[in-house]
Image: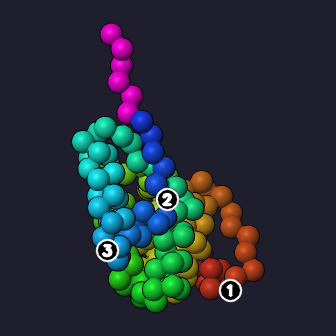
Amino acid sequence: MKTYHPKVVYVDTNVLLRFLLRDNSTQLKAAESLFKKAKERKIKLVVTQAVIFEINFVLKRVYSLPKEDIIPQFESLFSTPYFIIQDNETFNQALKLYKNSNNSLADCFLLTETKIEEAELFTFDKKLQKLT
């Protein structure tokens, strides 16, 4: 008997942005259709680290959203069972740190990763040094 392995699809930043922002109805429908396939386990959706950081950058810099509006979006994304988030646990922990600090999501991720790996962080960033 042959085992079924769903097709793996990597999701680009723009797909998730259209879903989060709901600013293009055609692309939103296409994204929702893709997500429905994942929910039905017809495909596996992968979201990479780079996409997460790019979403954060675009929402903050292009759309001028405060992190208080961005964090719930990420919490929802990270808890969606049909998304495979690269380094999901690290992102969840980093998001808690990000919520309670003035550091960037990237710095919070880096610090979280070093703690998980029981590694040392070497930085010249004074804000990040204070966080450690």
Q: Are marks 3 and 1 in contact (CB under 8 Å)?
A: no
- Alpha carbon separation for disc pair 3 and 1: 38 Å
Badge number at residue 12: 2
The residue shown at (36%, 14%) is 2
Quadrant of the rendered image containing residue 76: bottom left
Query: Please, is residue 98 above or below residue 16 in the view?
Result: below
Residues drawn in magenta: 1-6
Callout 3: helix, strand or loop? loop
Please tell me how crowded label 1 is: few (under 14), some (14-19), or many (20+) other residues with Cα within 10 Å: few
The residue shown at (24%, 42%) is 40
Which amino acid type corresponds to the residue marked 2 in the rendered image?
Asp
Label located before the other in sequence (3 or 2): 2
- Alpha carbon separation for disc pair 3 and 2: 16 Å
Q: Are marks 3 and 2 in contact (CB under 8 Å)?
A: no
| Quarter of the rendering occupied by the N terminus | top left
Asked if residue 48 shows in the view, the reply is: yes
Callout 2: helix, strand or loop? loop
Determine if the magenta segment contains residue 4. yes
Query: Please, is residue 59 above or below residue 12 in the view?
Result: below
Badge number at residue 126: 1
Q: Which residue is mark 3?
A: 22
